[in-house]
Image (cartoon, rainbow, N blue to C red):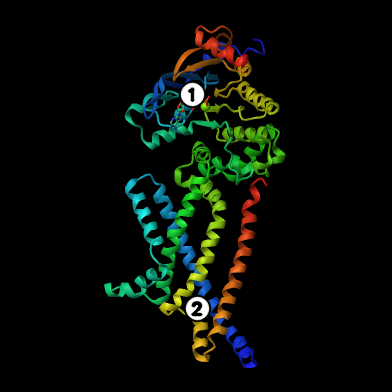
């Protein structure tokens, strides 16, 4: 297996961690998701690409209960199953949410808490892990992204790239089964994008299961196992990253990729 | 000014500052604390998304802001006894002032909560927090920072408004000044002295506000 090709088949052979079927969501009369299906295997990296407004963010938000879908099923690990057709209760949505952690486009760090407090807030306050253990965990994670010395800084004292790495560490510290990324680098200055992508590549290599909404085609090609092309709220095409990105079956996918590569 | 007048001013400074320390200041502090509890509750009711609950909160704010504080005070102290509810001057004053501050501060608190970006709620939910925890640990601390300047104004107004409590027989700064004035007939002198003491208290509060704002600003870029 070449280092630039994570090998389509490898992770996909694992058990399905997440199985989404027939996900629908409307805002008023605007049908944003029209029966989206998505399967993510343990250890797999799935990239979601698509035009602005195609519903990428909404898919992620439905996966962690930030948005309640109108219909569809989300199954996690074969055990937890939420059926949105029968308006699920809060307990079910919370259970779904607790399996994943999300990294936001605009980081959304807590500005009144230090870097360390941002990372330990979930483990200590929500998961009730021992304070000392949560701190040590957080410091180890910060060290691995090169931010150990900024543990006591406030978010405003960090660059965008550093803030996003803290955002990723905050998600990792929850020890989720699934990491969701919503355009994690698109708010960053170009010279800061690399650090964050490198970190995500390392996480993928470690075997984290990741769903990444991204416009970084090179990253998708090199790191993702599978690419899903979302078009007007439906999956128009999906398959091994290399195939979808270099030789898509659908003309619309081809157009979209061409426009991303050659904006002018 | 004659030396007799000087002696009067100096001699009355004791009772007047005593009235401030034993009356005005504790009355303002207790009423502000009560008012803030009401304000947060009313703000959350307005933001609850339940129409009836929100309407109730809106009605409360409208009633408080649409009626004079003096009338509110008199309703509690002189009005309620006719319904068989007799409340002493001090608790009456605290109840009336708390209700009043609650009505005004509710709007400040509501605006402050709304000023916290939606992404902060979402980040709190994503790390597993329920709404009350998110509110307490993530949203309200950030809302507090924005609301310090307007709430400081509310507090300073309240300190001055407590002088109305003299009308329901609470012994505070202004009532002490009135007593000396009536006895000595030096109205101008005593009321100016009272005004000066209020001013000094408010100056001290403004300084405190500055310190607090600086402290809460430590995590914000300048
Ligand atoms: N809360 C909402 N209320 C109303 N409409 C919404 C809401 N959230 C999203 N939409 C609409 O749903 C559509 C899909 O939005 P979504 O954010 O999922 O798109 P996206 O693919 O993530 O786009 P982008 O690349 O610009 O981030 C858009 O037309 C958007 O305007
Ligand atoms: Mg989006």
Q: Nearer the viewer, residue B196 or A35?
A: B196
Measured as percent of width and height from the top left, residue A152 is found at 68, 45
| Distance from mark 1 CB to nearest ligand 1 atom below 8 Å | yes
Q: Nearer the viewer, residue A60 or A6?
A: A60
Would residue B15 be seen by someone viewing this image from the given angle? Answer: no
Residue drawn 48% across and 49% down?
B111
Residue that protrudes farthest toward the bottom in the picture: B4
Q: Quadrant of the N terminus of chain A?
A: top right
Based on the displayed image, in which of its 4 quarters is residue A219 positioned?
top right
Disc 2 and disc 1 in contact, CB within 8 angstroms? no
Dot 2 falls on which chain?
B
Left/right placement of residue B96 relative to residue A198 reads left
Q: CA distance from mark 2 to mark 1?
A: 64 Å
Q: Which mark, residue B46?
A: none
Residue drawn 51% across and 42% down?
A126
Measured as percent of width and height from the top left, residue B181 is found at 52, 87
Q: How busy is the neighbourhood of tag 2: few (under 14 within 10 Å), some, or many (20 plus)?
A: many
Measured as percent of width and height from the top left, residue B219 is found at 64, 47
| Residue A125 vertical position relative to residue B209 in the rendered view, above or below | above
| Residue A210 vertical position relative to residue B221 in the rendered view, above or below | above
Q: Which mark, residue A53?
A: 1
Q: Quadrant of the C terminus of chain A?
A: top right
Q: Which mark, residue B172?
A: 2
Q: How busy is the neighbourhood of tag 1: few (under 14 within 10 Å), some, or many (20 plus)?
A: few
Dot 1 falls on which chain?
A
Residue that protrudes farthest toward the left in the picture: B83
SS for callout 1? loop
SS for callout 2? loop
Q: Nearer the viewer, residue B59 or B80?
A: B59
Residue drawn 56% across and 31% down?
A103
Q: Nearer the viewer, residue B56 or A113?
A: B56
């Amino acid at each position: 297996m070449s280092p630039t090709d994570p090998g389509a088949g490898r992770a996909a052979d694992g058990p399905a961690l997440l199985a989404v079927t027939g996900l629908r969501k409307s805002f008023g009369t605007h049908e944003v998701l029209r029966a989206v299906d998505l399967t993510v295997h343990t250890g797999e990296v799935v990239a979601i690409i698509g035009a602005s407004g195609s519903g990428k963010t909404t898919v992620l938000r439905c996966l962690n209960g930030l948005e309640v879908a109108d219909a569809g099923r989300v199954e996690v690990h074969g055990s937890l199953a939420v059926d949105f057709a029968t308006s699920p209760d809060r307990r079910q949505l919370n259970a779904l949410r607790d399996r994943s952690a999300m990294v936001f486009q605009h980081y959304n760090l807590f500005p009144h808490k230090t870097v360390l407090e941002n990372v330990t807030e979930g483990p200590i306050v929500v998961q009730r892990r021992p304070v000392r253990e949560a701190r040590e965990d957080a410091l180890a994670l910060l060290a691995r992204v090169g931010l150990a010395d900024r543990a006591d800084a406030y978010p405003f004292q960090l660059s965008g790239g550093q803030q996003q790495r803290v955002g990723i560490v905050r998600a990792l510290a929850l020890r989720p089964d699934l990491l969701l990324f919503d355009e994690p680098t698109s708010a960053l200055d170009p010279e800061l994008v690399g650090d964050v992508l490198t970190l995500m590549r390392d996480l993928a290599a470690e075997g984290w299961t990741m769903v990444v909404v991204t416009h970084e085609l090179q990253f998708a090609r090199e790191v993702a196992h599978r690419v899903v092309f979302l078009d007007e709220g439906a999956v128009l095409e999906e398959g091994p990253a290399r195939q979808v990105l270099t030789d898509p079956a659908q003309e619309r996918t081809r157009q979209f990729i061409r426009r991303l590569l050659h904006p002018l | 000014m004659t030396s007799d007048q000087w002696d009067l001013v100096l001699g009355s400074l004791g009772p007047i500052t005593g009235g401030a320390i034993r009356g005005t200041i504790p009355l303002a502090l207790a009423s502000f604390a009560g008012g803030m509890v009401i304000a947060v509750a009313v703000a959350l009711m307005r933001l609850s998304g339940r129409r009836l609950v929100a309407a109730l909160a809106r009605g409360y704010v409208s009633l408080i802001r649409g009626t004079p504080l003096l009338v509110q005070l008199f309703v509690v102290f002189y009005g309620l006894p006719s319904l068989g509810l007799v409340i002493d001057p001090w608790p009456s004053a605290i109840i009336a002032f708390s209700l009043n501050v609650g009505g005004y501060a509710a709007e400040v608190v509501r605006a402050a909560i709304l000023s916290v970006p939606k992404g902060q709620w979402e980040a709190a939910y994503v790390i597993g927090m329920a709404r009350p925890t998110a509110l307490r640990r993530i949203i309200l601390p950030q809302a507090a920072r924005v609301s310090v300047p307007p709430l400081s104004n509310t507090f300073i107004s309240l300190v001055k408004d407590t002088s109305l409590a003299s009308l329901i027989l609470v012994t505070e700064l202004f009532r002490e000044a009135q007593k000396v004035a009536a006895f000595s007939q030096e109205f101008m002198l005593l009321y100016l002295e009272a005004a000066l003491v209020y001013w000094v208290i408010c100056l001290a509060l403004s300084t405190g506000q500055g310190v607090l704002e600086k402290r809460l600003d430590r995590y914000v870029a300048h």
